[in-house]
Image: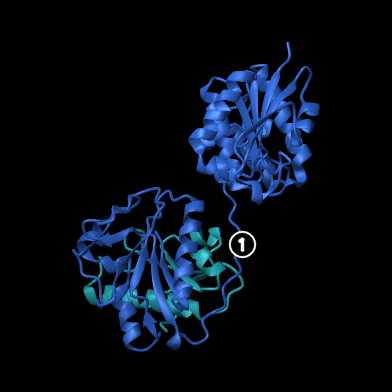
Chain colours: A cyan, B blue
């Protein structure tokens, strides 16, 4: 689905807990999520820490949207910075 | 004893005309017409195209019952051994008509075979019940297709059991037949792996869908002036699932308003995705799937201009690639029209 958006010129940041799958399928900007059961966050963390984690993930996604890429590229919130 | 074939063609291949005569009611001619002549030459002796039914594409589409009644009369009159319909290539109405003719023949206990482009709705809506040779989009490979039609027609008439789709050159019908192979699966898998690693040719027993390459869309230049939208395959819907989004094999997507919300409230939403445990999302925090709380924070800080007032959702559990493509394309059209410049896609 994300590729169809991209095919028409819309940059997409795809957040996935198993990045290998969308990367293998050809999605170009993939952001690593936490777990399939809670892609954008962690219920095991405190409310504040979970929100901070989610901010980091979405921030990485926003950064990815602004980054030129040549092909399927992984953006890891652990490495990247919040935009 | 002569093997008799009844051939179905549309108004164009029947040599009558194009779209301007698409309303042509069913006509029956003795002997072969147009590509039917080629078919006759390719049939093994003593095969004979005894008659040709020509139907206008619009006529058949709009007067289905009457058209099929006329085909039934022709079938009763000629009592063919086999019916050949098309090839229809990529012509949708023609493909549908060919499919209907084949299904009718089969209902009457007469074998039938057709040919069309694999994405022709005539095939895709009837794949389990049609013996169909794949064609390209245009009639350039007519001769080769007619050849294969003739060979399948001969086999049908001789009541020969057909081999696999790959062997015989027809489109897979999704029918699985157990066969005994010489070696157990584990050995065949290792053989295949060894061949692959040493650069030897090998043939997959189960072809995996190949994904096409989409060049990356240009990055967003000015995020602060860009409109964003959220799409997810995580199956998050308002509690109660008002539109009954299915938990697997989804073919539809829905959209729900997040316009006046600064975060998704636990309990107001649920995920009905059948492919993962939805407890955390449902009991703790729907923002795990649609991260609205932090997206709104970024919006308040003017990191991006505005958020599309609805998010789009389907369920990524056994979703067919073709359905996913279609849904993605539909959403894309809407977002582009609404001047959305980028999307966040939360996948599951």
Task: Give the position of the C terminus of chain B as an image quadrant.
Answer: bottom left
**Residue B174 in sight from this viewpoint:** no
Residue B141 versus residue B210 in the image, above or below:
above
Residue B55 versus residue B336 in the image, above or below:
above
B195 vs A8, nearest the viewer: A8
User: Dividing the picture into quarters, in which one does residue B219 lie?
Assistant: bottom right
Q: Residue furthest right?
A: B41
Pointer 1: residues within 10 angstroms few (<14), some, or many (20+)? some
Residue for badge 1: B213
B292 vs B8, nearest the viewer: B8
Q: To which chain does the residue with label 1 belong?
A: B
Left-right relation of B56 to B340? right
B246 vs A62, nearest the viewer: B246
Kindly identify the residue that appears in the image at 32 percent across and 68 percent down. B290
Kindly identify the residue that appears in the image at 32 percent across and 63 percent down. A38
Task: Give the position of the N terminus of chain B as an image quadrant.
Answer: top right
Q: Secondary structure at mark 1?
A: loop
Q: Position of residue B114 (x, y in %)?
A: 63, 34
Residue B164 versus residue B231 in the image, above or below:
above
Q: Position of residue B196 (x, y in %)?
A: 67, 45
């Amino acid at each position: 689905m994300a590729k169809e958006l991209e095919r028409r010129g819309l940059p997409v940041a795809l957040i996935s807990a198993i990045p290998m799958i969308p990367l293998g399928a050809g999605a170009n900007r993939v952001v690593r999520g936490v777990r399939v059961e809670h892609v954008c966050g962690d219920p095991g963390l405190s409310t504040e820490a979970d929100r901070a984690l989610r901010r980091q993930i979405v921030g990485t996604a926003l950064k990815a949207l602004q980054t030129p890429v040549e092909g399927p590229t992984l953006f890891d919130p652990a490495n990247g910075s919040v935009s | 004893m002569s093997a008799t074939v009844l051939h179905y063609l549309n108004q164009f291949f029947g040599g009558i005309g194009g779209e301007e005569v698409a309303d042509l009611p069913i006509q029956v001619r003795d002997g072969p017409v147009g590509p039917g002549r080629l078919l006759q030459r390719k049939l093994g002796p003593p095969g004979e195209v005894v008659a040709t039914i020509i139907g206008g594409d619009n006529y058949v589409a709009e007067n289905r019952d009457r058209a099929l009644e006329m085909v039934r009369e022709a079938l009763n009159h000629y009592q063919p051994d086999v019916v050949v319909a098309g090839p229809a290539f990529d012509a949708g109405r023609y493909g549908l008509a060919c499919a209907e003719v084949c299904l009718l023949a089969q209902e009457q206990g007469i074998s039938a075979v057709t040919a069309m482009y694999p994405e022709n709705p005539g095939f895709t809506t009837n794949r389990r019940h049609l013996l169909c040779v794949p064609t390209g989009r245009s009639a350039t490979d007519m001769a080769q297709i007619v050849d294969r039609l003739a060979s399948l027609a001969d086999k049908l008439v001789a009541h020969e059991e057909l081999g696999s789709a790959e062997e015989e050159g027809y489109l897979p019908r999704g029918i699985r037949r157990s066969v005994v192979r010489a070696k157990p699966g584990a050995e065949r898998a290792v053989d295949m792996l060894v061949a692959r690693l040493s650069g030897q040719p090998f043939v997959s027993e189960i072809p995996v869908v190949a994904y096409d390459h989409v060049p990356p869309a240009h990055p967003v230049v000015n995020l602060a002036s860009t409109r964003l939208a959220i799409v997810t395959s995580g199956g998050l819907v308002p509690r109660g699932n008002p539109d009954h989004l299915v938990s697997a094999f989804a073919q539809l997507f829905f959209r729900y308003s997040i316009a006046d919300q600064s975060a998704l409230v636990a309990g107001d939403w649920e995920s009905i995705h059948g492919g993962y445990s939805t407890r955390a999302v449902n009991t703790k925090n729907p923002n795990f799937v649609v991260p609205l709380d932090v997206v709104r924070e970024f919006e308040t800080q003017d990191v991006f201009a505005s958020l599309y007032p609805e998010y789009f959702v389907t369920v990524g559990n056994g979703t067919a690639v073709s359905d996913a493509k279609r849904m993605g394309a539909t959403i894309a059209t809407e977002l582009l029209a609404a001047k959305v410049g980028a999307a966040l896609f939360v996948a599951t």
